[in-house]
Image (cartoon, rainbow, N blue to C red):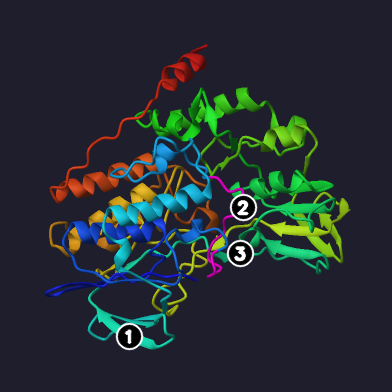
Amino acid sequence: MAFALIACCDDDIYLACPGFISGPSGITSAKNCKQYNIDFDIFEKNDKVGGNWVFNSKTGHSSVYENTHIISSKRLSEYEDYPMPDSYPDYPRHDQLQQYFENYSKAFDVYDQIKFNHTIDKVIRTPDGEWLVAYTDNDGEKQQKTYQYLMVSNGHHWMPKYPKYEGEFTGKLMHSHDFKGVDDEWRDKRILIIGAGNSGCDVAIESARVSKDVYLSMRSPQWFLPKFMMGQPSDILLKSMEKIPSNLRQKLLTKTLKIYSGDYASYGLPRNTKPVLSHHPTVNSDLIDYVRHGKVKPKPGVKRFDGNMVEFTDGTREHFDIVCCCTGFWTVFDFFDKSLIDFQHSEQVPLYRKMMHADYDNLYFIGLFQPIGCIWPLADFQARVACQEILGKYKRPSNMAKTIQHELDNPHYDFERGQRHAVEVDYNTLRKELVDDLATASVTVPDKHYDVSAKNLLLNMVKI
């Protein structure tokens, strides 16, 4: 697990940020502290910038594989004050993103302050409400320091969540977190992928290039969004519809997908009876083609393991050499005592704007949300809000418990309940909320313009 510590020392202000600083949320937290003249220290367990986008990270934190590309478009993924290069494709590779994050940290004069090869071991709340941070430095020495403020930005895609079934599988059982690409071990083998989220579909497509048979187990229906719709990246198309009421937006997108892909049930995928955006969609342009070409075979949920056999909920049984569980991650913070912070099994994480705790007004979670879009630019806005509050220019709601409950009772969409959607948000809505919060601190955020020429085409098609 990799962490960052931002220790800001400005007279009475001391801010620590244990998180994956060289990841997107951490470096933007550091950037904002720098811009608002809050002094800081930075600690990083890895030896380079990039967080989850460091391929084969020595920390074991990274989940990217050899052919990983981002699933949100570059224009909705880039920090709004630091565009990605024009030479980058609409959906950059992991190495391009790692370089982008490194360049970002250097452009904002953060990189040289990162203390690489440092690990945060424990964060303890002191009796007077401050934060004692214990860490191991790059020489293996144990150190500790106390801070007034704490930012947590270590991400939530690092502790694999395995499903539980009866029996035992005697072939190779793994999680997508450990998938780094297909090699000879996968060639001409029978593969089962459990889970049809973004990782599941990626692993299914990659393994289908070399494996003998690839099966995709889906416990429940899923919407599959192509990366491009109407000539635009699909998230840009969704961005163009932000002023349309959410229920109408869902209906338009649902109708568009049905026209694009046809009836899922006609080629073996479970038919989805709920509208798009009721749950987190899978963004993949290849899955439908691979299913219809017979390269990936849909199966229902797994019932039990029996040696190298897997029994499914429809009673069928198949032999497999490798089972890859693409079943998500736990939202955990193992440097906190669970009596203080424990979101692991929460179906709704109780944080205002997905960042502020009701009981600890000197604690901020940066990037702890799952948008229909990208985390990074919104994490930048969260960090700006945190810095404004630390400087006394932003005032959080007076009754935090009541305000947080109101947010939980009124999600951006009527998301399905469950741990999978514990931190789900709508990109456009959360951006507006954070921008409005910054406005109360007299911080103006300029509008960002996108090419949304597909909007009228979509609306006219629906009228037809």
Which one is nearer the viewer's eye here, 53 or 425? 53
| Crowding at mark 3 (Cα within 10 Å: few <14, some 14-19, many 20+) | some
- Say which amino acid is labelled 1: Gln
Q: Is residue 165 above or below residue 447?
A: below
Could you tell me which residue is drawn at 50 percent across and 68 percent down?
344
Q: Is residue 430 above or below residue 236?
A: below
Label 1 vs label 2: CA separation?
37 Å
* Numbered disc 3: secondary structure: loop
* Numbered disc 1: secondary structure: strand
Left or right of residue 455, residue 296 in this image? right
Q: In this rendering, which labeled residue sits more in front, label 1 or label 3? A: 1
- Say which amino acid is labelled 2: Glu
Could you tell me which residue is drawn at 65 percent across and 50 percent down?
200
Label 2 vs label 3: CA separation?
22 Å
Q: Give x and y (percent) for residue 198.
A: 59, 47
Label 1 vs label 3: CA separation?
31 Å
Left or right of residue 233, residue 142 in this image? left
Q: Which residue is mark 1?
A: 144
Which one is nearer the viewer's eye here, 290 or 456? 290
Could you tell me which residue is drawn at 39 percent across and 77 percent down?
340
Q: In this rendering, which labeled residue sits more in front, label 2 or label 3? A: 2
For residue 66, the mark is 2
